[in-house]
Amino acid sequence: MEYSVEVDRDQALVFVSLDGEATGPILNRCVAECHRLGAIAPLVGVIWDFRNADLSDLALPDMQEAIKISASSDVLNNIRIAIVIGGDQDELLMNLWCEAGRAFDHRERQIFRKIDAAATWAVARPA
């Protein structure tokens, strides 16, 4: 599994990109890196790019643990979380992740097929 966590300071976004088999420990490392970056400068959103990830072994407890870690700090309290997927199978699993997240925090989450649309949504603030 390869992954990267990069920040776009102009848009105040973090881009998390995963390539290969996604696991709970990888998600947790990415969440920790998002927290570190959010502590340095305010962020408005996180883009999780799962288009090249293999999510077949990712289980609900893995997703819940990443959500608990994320919710344990107020560094990222008011962010929007955009999830970019590659296919229908991934959408079912990511819908589950979004629903699980609602039990832990009030962050907005939405699933996208295109990364540009995800970034546009993540930086937009409701009127």
Image (cartoon, helix red, strand yellow):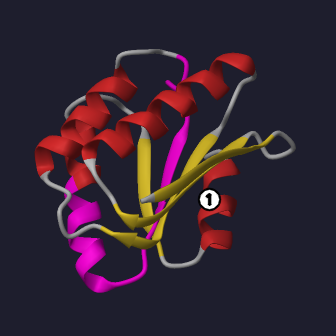
Image quarter for residue 42? Answer: top right
| Occupied quadrant, residue 114 | bottom right
| Kind of residue sitting beneath label 1 | Trp
The residue at 47%/28% (across/down) is 32
- Residue 45, percent across and down? 61, 43
Between 27 and 101, the one lying in front of the other is 27
Question: Image quadrant for the C terminus?
Answer: top right
Residue 110 among magenta residues: no
Q: Residue at x 65, y 17 (%)?
A: 39
Quadrant of the frame with the N terminus: bottom left
Looking at the image, can residue 78 be seen? no
Outermost residue, bottom side:
87
- Which residue is farthest right? 10
- On whether residue 82 falls in the magenta region, the answer is yes
Which residue lies under the disc numbered 1? 121
Which residue, as the protein is rendered here, is positioned at the far front?
1
Using the image as rendered, state which of residue 102 and residue 55 is in the foreground: 55
Q: What is the tally of numbered marks visible in this picture?
A: 1
Q: Is residue 86 above or below residue 127?
A: below
Helix or strand or loop: what does disc 1 sit on? Answer: helix
Give the residue drawn at x 59%, y 51%.
Answer: 4
Residue 55 location in percent, x, y?
Answer: 27, 67
Q: Is residue 4 left or right of residue 9?
A: left
Disc 1 crowd rating (10 Å Cα; few below 14, some 14-19, many 20+) is some
Residue 57 position within the rendered picture, expressed as x and y whole percent measured from the top left? 17, 63
Q: Residue at x 52, y 54 (%)?
A: 3
Could you tell me if residue 126 is visible in this image?
yes
Query: Which span is picked out in magenta?
Result: 75-96
Question: In the figure, is residue 112 to the left or right of 61?
Answer: right
Report x, y in % for residue 120: 69, 62
